[in-house]
């Protein structure tokens, strides 16, 4: 019989990788897993209960909130509050950070940044949605958590992951020692190790971008898209275009099959659309840990110094060689030397 490793067992086994670990991060990851299962249950029956549709309220970004966004946010915050290892949550759904006040969390050392339900506009049409999270360690020993402790660079993440509520539900995470994926087995209610040591192919043939915004893209991105569409046998072009519109699902495909996901600046979103702290940093950490690359067009996502919680950034993420190519197109625009789109390589 094949040995099944549950998420809980795996987390405990891996604790040995950190000789001074006291089990706090393990417990925190376990809490995230528990909340993911609860959210999964609700997402799965979304069409059956009266939970779909707008709440009529808007979040801090002025976007309409879906009931499931609010539900997921509540579940994650509640699991993190009762787990005792998290002192503050920075969530897409809250303007300010949420301090965890429970007695059990008095000495908690971890900060969690989270997009509780990413791609939520897809819930009404039964398309995959996700949760994206990032974990930092407090920089101060005690006292109330200061904003500067939360605004750490992505390189300081101690763990990051995403859950994808799709044709099956998966939790993928890293603690900086590779990336592992777990699939939820609904019959036993456990996430089971299904994708050990995930590695992203160095190159790929899929590009993923909301091409409807083409006219609003910077010239380097327009040139790269044209490059992807030109026929060239040596580089297997034209590439395939795939865009789900749920970052977790688009990145998951990119991680497994190789490719590139792009959300550039646009004339209507001059800073990009996706959020640094709870969308781009965690995904960049995971993709780098799997052997890929993530940049904002000029530098590493993980080295951006955050100025505020809900900061946005452009992102180009995926197979290293494809991300390098986009950067080449950006540089070519800067020095006004166009790269011929038919060129191999
Ligand atoms: P959300 O967190 O409000 O759901 O927005 C983030 C989502 C990402 O999952 C996805 O990559 C992107 O927004 C899609 O945006 P667009 O509709 O502009 O292509
Ligand atoms: Mg999101």
Image (cartoon, rainbow, N blue to C red):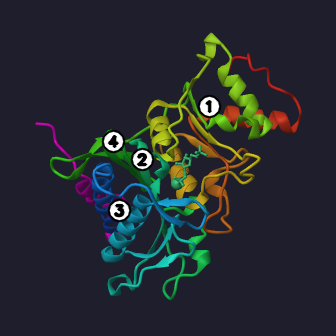
* Residue visible at 72% across and 47% down in the picture: 265
Question: Within 10 angstroms of label 3, few (less than 14), some, or many (20 or more) residues?
Answer: many
> Could you tell which of marks 2 and 1 lies nearer the N-terminus?
2
Find residue 24 and name its label: none
> Within the magenta stretch, is there residue 236?
no
Quarter of the view holding residue 206 = top right
Instruction: Determine whether label 1 and label 4 are within 8 Å by CB.
Output: no
Q: Earlier in the sequence, mark 3 or mark 2?
A: 3
Residue 28 x, y percent position in the rendering: 35, 67
Spatial CA span between label 2 and label 1: 36 Å
Left or right? Give the position of 27 relative to 290. left
Indicate which label's residue lies in the foreground, 3 or 4: 3
Q: Secondary structure at mark 2?
A: helix
In the picture of the structure, the residue carrying the numbered disc 3 is 32
Residue 62: image location, x then y, percent: 61, 63
Residue highlighted by disc 1: 321
70 displayed left or right of 103:
right
Q: In front: mark 4 or mark 2?
A: 2
Give the residue drawn at x 53%, y 82%.
Answer: 145
Q: Earlier in the sequence, mark 1 or mark 3?
A: 3
Q: Is mark 2 within 8 Å of ligand 1?
A: no
- Disc 4 and disc 2: Cα gap in Å? 32 Å
Of callouts 1 and 4, which one flags the residue occurring earlier in the amino acid sequence?
Answer: 4
Tell which circle, 4 or 2, labels the residue nearer the N-terminal end. Answer: 2
Q: Nearer the viewer, residue 175 or 214?
A: 214
The disc label shown at residue 124, or none = 2
- On whether ligand 2 comes within 8 Å of the CB at mark 3, the answer is no
């Amino acid at each position: 019989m094949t040995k099944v490793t549950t998420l809980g067992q795996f987390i405990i086994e891996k604790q040995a990788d950190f000789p001074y670990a006291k089990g706090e991060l393990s417990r925190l990851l376990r809490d995230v897993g528990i909340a993911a299962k609860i959210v999964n249950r609700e997402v799965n029956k979304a069409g059956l209960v009266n939970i779909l549709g707008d709440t009529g309220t808007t979040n801090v970004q002025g976007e309409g909130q879906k009931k499931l966004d609010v539900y997921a946010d509540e579940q994650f915050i509640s699991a993190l509050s009762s787990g005792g290892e998290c002192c503050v949550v920075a969530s897409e759904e809250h303007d300010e950070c949420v301090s965890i006040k429970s007695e059990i969390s008095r000495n908690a050392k971890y900060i969690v940044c989270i997009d509780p339900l990413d791609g939520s506009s897809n819930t009404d049409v039964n398309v995959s949605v996700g949760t994206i999270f990032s974990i930092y360690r407090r920089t101060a020993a005690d006292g109330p958590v200061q904003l500067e402790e939360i605004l750490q660079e992505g390189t300081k993440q101690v763990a990051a992951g995403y859950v994808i509520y799709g044709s099956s539900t998966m939790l993928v995470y890293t603690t900086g020692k590779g990336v592992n994926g777990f699939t939820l087995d609904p019959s036993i209610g456990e996430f089971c190790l299904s994708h050990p040591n995930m590695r992203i192919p160095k190159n790929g043939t899929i590009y993923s971008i909301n091409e409807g915004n083409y006219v609003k893209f910077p010239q380097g991105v327009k040139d790269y898209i044209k490059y992807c569409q030109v026929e060239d046998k040596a580089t297997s072009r034209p590439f395939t275009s795939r865009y789900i519109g749920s970052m977790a699902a688009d990145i998951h495909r990119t991680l497994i099959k190789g490719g590139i996901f792009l959300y550039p600046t646009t004339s209507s979103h001059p800073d990009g659309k996706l959020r640094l702290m709870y969308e781009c940093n965690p995904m960049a950490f995971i993709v780098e840990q799997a052997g890929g690359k993530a940049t904002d067009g000029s530098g590493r996502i993980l080295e951006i110094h955050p100025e505020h919680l809900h900061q946005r950034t452009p992102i180009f993420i995926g197979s290293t060689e494809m991300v390098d190519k986009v950067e080449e197109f950006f540089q070519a625009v800067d020095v006004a030397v166009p790269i011929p789109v038919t060129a191999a390589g």
